[in-house]
Amino acid sequence: MTERTRTVGFLRRATVTSAALAVAALAGGCGPGGGTDRAAEPGQQPSAAMTPKEALLAAVPDGTEGTIRFSGRDSSSTLSGVVDPAAKGAEITTAVKDADLGFTTTLSFRIVADEAWMKVKFSNTKGLTGFPKLPDRWLRLDRARITDAESAPVYEGADLGNAGPLIEAATEVKEEADRRYAGTIDLTSGEAAKVLDAEEMTALGAKAAAVPFTAQVGPDGNLAALSLQVPAAGGRKAYEYLVQYRDYGTAPKVTAPTGTAAQEAPAAAYELLNG
């Protein structure tokens, strides 16, 4: 899932790189930002004067709500974690299954202010060899040793699922019962054009200009879910692009790993990240 932050895009590229390393021997961001400006305070009912699109944008997390759990999925990967705006922190985990060889790469990042750590796990690898040997600990990253330093993991806001830029690109938004919304999104517009990878956008062609979506806002006025029904294109089946937010203000805080839970990243970690 190529998400709003460059961090998640970097995470996805790293899983692709790890797969390539394994195959030799045997899935960025829409740019920085902390979500859209809210048109209403958290927990408040939107003003009657607001359009459905404005009301939905007002529900997107912007960092004022405290810690948040999130999850998401697309055609090939899943994503989950916690964001902690007060600490400028996030913990993000993605799992990507190799379609041909069947193994799964699970890659996690933990970010606190200017520091970042990673964990990597390979599963379903029976009969396969050549995977990097990495400790089962949080591996502290030295940004100077990451080739593409500009895309190194950093904290970039609360809206890790692209809800803000996607809703901004909505060409139609209707409010239904029980704080539910529906409409269409133009994935070729603005920052939304960076949510899916370039190859998929090319395959979608004109279909990308009117992708159906639904969204659910919780009783607290915060966004609970955003779902896009991405149509089949270029030999890829139709799928759901889903983002979910929950536990606003009650999710666990994100802290730096300490003691035996962490160590400096070995050379093999940088070889994986740098390809």
Image (cartoon, rainbow, N blue to C red):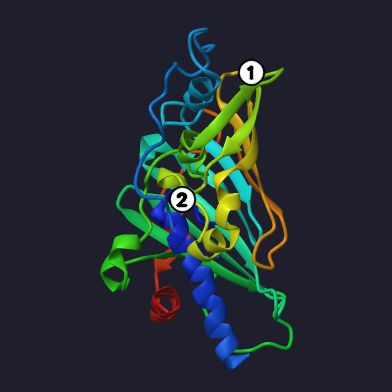
Residue 152: image x %, image y %? 35, 61
Location of residue 234 with respect to 43 vertically, above or below: below
Residue 255: image x %, image y %? 43, 46
- Check disc 2 and report the residue beneath it: 193
Location of residue 128 with respect to 123 vertically, above or below: below
Examine the image and state in which quarter residue 238 appears: bottom right
Residue 127: image x %, image y %? 73, 88
* Image depth: mark 2 or mark 1 in front: 2
- Check disc 1 and report the residue beneath it: 219
Residue 126: image x %, image y %? 74, 83
Location of residue 74 with respect to 14 vertically, above or below: above
Characterize the local packing of mark 2: few (<14), some (14-19) or many (20 or more) Cα atoms within 10 angstroms. Answer: some
Instruction: Give, as a three-letter code, the residue at label 2.
Output: Ala
Instruction: Give, as a three-letter code, the residue at label 1.
Output: Pro
Q: Residue at x 53, y 33 (%)?
A: 171
Whole-number angstrom distance, CA of label 2 to CA of label 1: 30 Å
In the image, 144 versus 229, the foreground residue is 229
Examine the image and state in which quarter residue 226 appears: top right
Q: Secondary structure at mark 2?
A: helix
Tell me if I can see residue 167 in this picture. yes
Q: Residue at x 48, y 38 (%)?
A: 169
In the image, taking residue 209 as reference, residue 73 lies left or right, namely right
Tell me if I can see residue 260 in this picture. no
Location of residue 16 with respect to 245 vertically, above or below: below
In the image, taking residue 14 as reference, residue 97 lies left or right, namely right
> Which of marks 1 and 2 precedes in the sequence?
2
Q: Secondary structure at mark 1?
A: loop
Q: Quadrant of the C terminus?
A: bottom left
Q: Quadrant of the N terminus?
A: bottom right
